[in-house]
Image: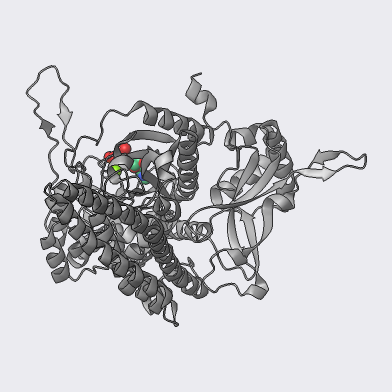
Amino acid sequence: MSFVSDIFGSAVFHDGVMKERLPKEIYRSLRETRDSGKPLDPSVATVVASVMKDWAVEKGATHFTHWFQPMTGITAEKHNSFITPAPDGRVIMEFSGKELVVGESDASSFPSGGLRATFEARGYTAWDPTSSAFVKDTTLYIPTAFCSYSGEALDKKTPLLRSMEAVNRQAVRLLRLLGNTASKRVDVTVGPEQEYFLIDRSLWEKRRDLMYAGRTLFGSKPPKGQEMDDHYYGAIKQRVNDFMKEVDEQLWRLGVFAKTKHNEVAPAQHELAPIFETANIATDHNQVTMETLKKVAEKHGLACLLHEKPFKGINGSGKHNNWSLCTDDGLNLLEPGDSPQENEQFLLFLCAVIRAVDEHADLLRLSVATAGNDHRLGAHEAPPAIVSIFLGDQLSEILKSFSLGEVARGGEATFMETGVKSLPRLHRDATDRNRTSPLAFTGNKFEFRMAGSSLSVSEPNVVLSTAVADVLSRFAERLESVSDVRREVRRIIGDTARSNGRVIFDGNSYGDDWKAEAERRGLPDITDTVEAAPRFITPENISFFLRHKVYTEAEIRSRYEVYLESYGKTINIEGETMVEMARREIAPACVRFKREVCEAKLAVKACGADCHLEDALIERLGALTAALDENIRDLAEALTELPDGASFERAAYYRDKVLPAMEELRGTADGLEEIVASDVWPFPTYGDLLYRI
Ligand code: ADP
Ligand code: MG
């Protein structure tokens, strides 16, 4: 056994442990719940709880927690110890079936978007047996869903599970119509690639903006940015390597398939990619990954930044969400095979995604909308805010032939000529890479690149999966109403290519001409969260979610509120942080420096020497510090004059009044940073943050 296979999953109560430790009948019953969603028998829970507790205690656990994913985007936990008083004054370790299955907590301190009135503050957590429990530090973590007293989802897991069920229903229905009788389930598979920045922790501690807001709110451009392309895939520095090694080990113990690590495009930026899993588990594991990155960084004297845009002018971080559909008997429904032009089942599922994305581009955009990600989308480094699909030449050609009713030709397998005999012959992939597309078909999966690095991947997958389920159900209806299924399949493919082909774009999505072209095609360009949020509550989108039982109307309205509320709160914190930094750090530093220059000027003048430099500096400092004073006051005022009214008006106010005031203040402060002596400047600069590891 290798070290890795020894430790992999050693902290997880996984299938192997259950099979070994649970009585046969109990194991079988639990397996049925995990595999096919059969409701759990309470007597099974009692036995599982007791076995799980014994296992966890052997692993050093003293506590357990229901672990859930409220609408904050991060996870929540409340630890309870296993201790129960024994009659002899000692304690025994106990854990009941009820404690495993349900938990109760005060939901009033989590975002609910008005779903939960304070008089019914109770929230409930319910065990998700499809995601394995694990031990971290000295606590047994039990993945759970989180809902209100009235049963409405207050979390990110419940809708995800519902959307996976919706796709499963419709995909199996379609497979049956296509003659597949073997597959019993269709799962959504997800592989989220995680980007992040690593900076020195002692420098991080000196920046209130990083501590409070997770991103720099001030900072002028360093002389060296990412123009040399020397960081991407560069040799990994020792300190970073030590960090990554420990991250991998911890993740492996927790059963996360951490696979690939490399340096990213921006200085100090890195990426970690796992092997894909079913969407629910991939989402849980991505949360564990983000927490582990932060924790291990701290241990190594580093700070891990998960914000989507920590540095102005430097690439932001995303989370590429690789998405596909896989049957329980191992069939990837988006695998084109050797001759995609004849693979009608593949083309049908491909078309389902194309139509789904075209019809629900607005919801997909909304699913990744946060104040942080708004800085990244459309910023000529990340996908634009316009949702489009990259298919590559071969598939685009095939769909075109279908739309014209022609016989599609398959591309020939081709090889690349390296001109060196000793190198292996390289097979040319059917699709090249396109790094600019928001949603690229990459061989046998779709890669959705609009998600921000700090985001839970739940939401984009809820939208993508529900949208695909919706289209699949309409395809199934058409096939159910005809006798010649194959002919109808070809018609559907042709129809989709004609009516939804506008969403396919293989060119450079970063270019400005694409914006104009997209507008001509009628594709929405939703630039920010405030504009995106109302798309959630349009009558069509409400009935779309209701149709597939993914959200109730109350849940949709509450989530709409949460989007807008958290947008406003984020900007409020950023604005307050800027005012504080400008007043208490930047302004005093400028005063000190000004005095230094003025004193110097007097001394120079006394010698009869030339004061040109001092005069110029004093003038420049004078102008900029006057502007600084004004900008601080403007921002502080903007932050106190919030309008009453609906959450939409408040969010729009933050976008239209507060953000521009922040920009103004930043411009002035960054100008000052460029002329104030570096030993006087109150916090580490971009150069320090990006190049000190
Ligand atoms: P890149 O995008 O850099 O080419 P890879 O090809 O290694 O990277 O894959 C990126 C991610 O896609 C990985 O997390 C991988 O597990 C995931 N992935 C691969 N196949 C699937 C699939 N069928 N469903 C979902 N994710 C997948
Ligand atoms: Mg990728």
Front residue of 493/82: it is 82
Q: Quadrant of residue 516?
A: bottom left
Percent position of residue 666, x then y? 29, 60
Percent position of residue 147, x then y? 59, 63
Front residue of 205/597: it is 597
Relative to 647, is 429 on the left or the right? left
Farthest residue toward the left?
419
Relative to 391, is 419 on the left or the right? left
Percent position of residue 408, x then y? 14, 51
Q: Is there any visible trace of residue 92 in the rendered image? A: yes
Relative to 29, is 205 on the left or the right? left
Q: How many marks?
A: 0
Farthest residue toward the top?
422
Q: Residue at x 92, y 42 (%)?
A: 87
Front residue of 252/548: it is 252
Ligand 1: image quarter: top left
Quadrant the C terminus occupies: top left
Percent position of residue 381, x then y? 22, 51
Q: Residue at x 18, y 60 (%)?
A: 619
